[in-house]
Image: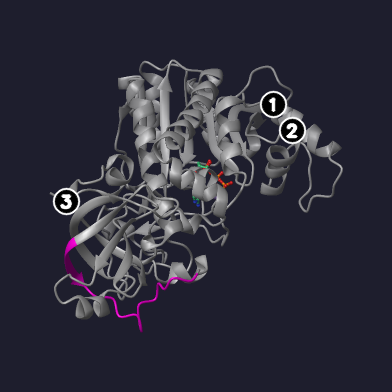
Amino acid sequence: MTSRIIDLLRTGQPAQTVTIRGWVRTKREQKEFCFVEVNDGSSLVGLQAILSADLPDYAEQLKKLSTGASVEISGSLVESPAKGQRIELKASQLTIHGEANPETYPLQKKRHSFEFLREIAHLRARTNTIGAVFRVRNACANAVHDFFQARGFLWVHTPIISANDCEGAGELFTVTALDLKNIPKTSDQEIDYSQDFFGRRAFLTVSGQLEAEILAMAFSNVYTFGPTFRAENSNTSRHLAEFWMIEPEMAFCNLDGNMDLAEAFLKHIFKSVLESCPEDMEFFNQRIDNTVLATAENIISSEFPRITYTEAIALLEKADRQFEYPVAWGLDLQSEHERYLAEELFQKPLIVTDYPSAIKAFYMRQNDGEPDDRKTVRAMDILAPKIGEIVGGSQREERLDQLEKRIQQAGLPLEELWWYLDLRRYGTVPHAGFGLGFERVVQFMTGMTNIRDVIPFPRSPLNAEF
Ligand code: ATP
Ligand code: MN
């Protein structure tokens, strides 16, 4: 039976006979024997194997054994005299499955830049940093399901192909099966989507929220966790064209309940990743960003301050610095403003609520009794140091007449949202939810500066290789 290297490193005992499989990370030749570090992806550090000259075909095998080669090694565990490792593997049998020519294998022992590694995304998971990122990403995903399942939320699968374009104006990818060399046109020279696959124009979804609301009106508490697409032409370190989003939606819930859940959720994710990936997190703290562990502790133990948008504007107006973008009541917060609040002023994640209705989506619940020029909605954004917005959510408008008014004000067609409006016609309840960008969390947790390094195969403008 083959053992996972992580299990051997944690609980392997001297004299135990084991077999490991993996890829060679390093090889150190001595006179009579050779050390190879083998990594199978289960942990940051590999297991050191000692190959001695009495192995069959030793000299020949050794030539084939270079960084990147795949091997299977059997032997017995022995106590290691070397510093930093408890045990090592004294090999009695070695099989080389595949060589990796050192002349051409791009991952040599030296440090490579993340930009370079992105160009070899088919190999980069074999590096320390990217390997650690994807283990943490897995632990995060697991923590997401843990959190919601323990609370009785149903995981629902909302469509990836969607005909509703009400949300992400301008950021939609069209899905079509039309013959692009011979596009059918209507009499007024528009593309005739009625001849397309769905008989109408369709898109890749920018959010599963509206469909999640449908399901919350039957199951009370639901969440989505799936891919989301935005044709963002912003080439930033925080935006991907394809990313994963988590969107819980709760019936019988207001903005306070929504904020409580979002805060508990972030705390849970950080806590469980620290528990399940301690070596990887330690590595990020040492090699990527020395505030990673302190940040995680800070998130787990501190309460997130909650301020209104109006208060946030007042704080920004008092700031002892010049921002690139203007600060005034009614304008949206820019990333520099969000980061000033989270990184410098509060030095922890904070929640900003009650944004002007004019800058927020039609489905957010209007606050009552405000003057016309200061109308706000029950929105909440969680702003995190280094990242800016990490969660965006709101209490939803559950009143039919108000919702219709907002849809019309936004210039959207009421008829197309007939099913969404039906939810307010039949058994409407106060409800709330939020969206959390999964990669933003992984980025925040690991301290990685570019979001393209926390998803295995990033999609961004001019970039869809692999
Ligand atoms: P931003 O202002 O950062 O572009 P947004 O206002 O467009 O965010 P929402 O529409 O509220 O974001 O989406 C919900 C969450 O999805 C955001 O809080 C963020 O965590 C994440 N997110 C949004 N756009 C992207 C993207 N292009 N790539 C990765 N994550 C994203
Ligand atoms: Mn955006």
Image-based side of 315 in relation to 182, left or right: right
Q: Secondary structure at mark 1?
A: strand
Q: Secondary structure at mark 3?
A: loop
Image-based side of 223 in relation to 267, left or right: left
Q: Nearer the viewer, residue 461 or 217?
A: 461
Q: Secondary structure at mark 2?
A: helix
Mark 3, residue position: 2
- For the record, the magenta segment spans 92-110
Instruction: Tell whether circle 1 marks a residue whose Cβ is less than 8 angstroms from ligand 1.
Output: no
Mark 2, residue position: 312
* Gap in angstroms between the C-alphas marked 3 and 2: 57 Å
Which label sits on residue 307?
Answer: 1
Task: Find residue 353 and report its image quarter.
Answer: top right
Sooner in the amino-acid sequence: mark 3 or mark 2:
3
Which label sits on residue 221?
Answer: none
Crowd rating for badge 3 (residues with CA inside 10 Å; few <14, some 14–19, many 20+): few
Instruction: Indicate the amino acid at tag 1.
Output: Ile
Residues tagged 3 and 2 counted as in contact (Cβ below 8 A): no
**In this picture, is 400 found above or below 88?**
above
Residues tagged 3 and 1 counted as in contact (Cβ below 8 A): no
